[in-house]
Amino acid sequence: MKRLTLCVAILGIAGCGSDAIKQKTDVHNANTEEKDTGSVKTEAELDKAIADYTEAIRVKPEDAMTYVLRGFAYAYKHEFDTAIADYSEAIRLDPAHAVAYYNRGLAYKALGDKMKADADLAKGRELGFKD
């Protein structure tokens, strides 16, 4: 089975305002039989995280990092096209967002689009992402 490592940041949201967001970053393995899911353990928790990120985006739509975080959750669910859309929006909002480029590259890689994957992974590294 193909192994894909994703850098995943999980938000704990208590309330809806941007001040209520705290970040916890972990590295997790997706596409493996034995996933280390860290803070996110179930499909229901991923769905809740996505709902929370969506509400945070509604409150503060210009926050690129929230799009990246929701993209992580979608990638965890193997919804790579939706993850790519969120990473792309983060890049539109912050063209120097290394994590957004790198993780979009990982999502393209998971979909088998080597050319786009390589370009985004390289751009993420160029902007300072350390893998």
Image: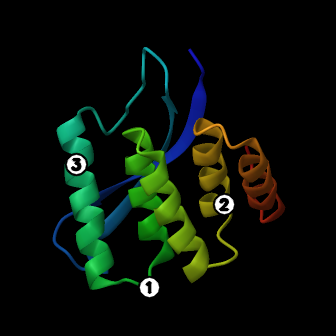
**Distance between the alpha carbons at the discs numbered 1 and 2:** 17 Å
Q: Quadrant of the N terminus?
A: top right
Compared with 27, 57 (above or below) is: below
**Distance between the alpha carbons at the discs numbered 2 and 3:** 23 Å
Tell me the amino acid under the disc marked 3.
Answer: Asp
The residue lying toward the viewer, choosing from 25 and 66, is 66
Residue identifier under label 1: 62
Residue 130 placement (x, y as % from top left) = 74, 49
**Distance between the alpha carbons at the discs numbered 3 and 1:** 22 Å
Q: Which colour scheme is used?
A: rainbow
Q: What element carries label 2?
A: helix
Describe residue 80's horizontal placement relative to residue 123 as left or right.
left
Compared with 24, 6 (above or below) is: above
**Residue at position x 53%, y 63% in the image:** 87
Tell me the amino acid under the disc marked 2.
Answer: Tyr
Describe residue 70's horizontal placement relative to residue 54 as left or right.
right
Tell me the amino acid under the disc marked 1.
Answer: Glu
Q: Residues within 10 Å of mark 3 (few under 14, many from 20)?
A: some
Q: What element carries label 1?
A: loop
- Image label count: 3
Are the residues tagged 3 and 1 within 8 Å (C-beta)?
no
Residue identifier under label 3: 47
Please report whichever mark, 1 or 2, sits nearer to the chain's N-terminal start: 1
Q: Residues within 10 Å of mark 2 (few under 14, many from 20)?
A: many
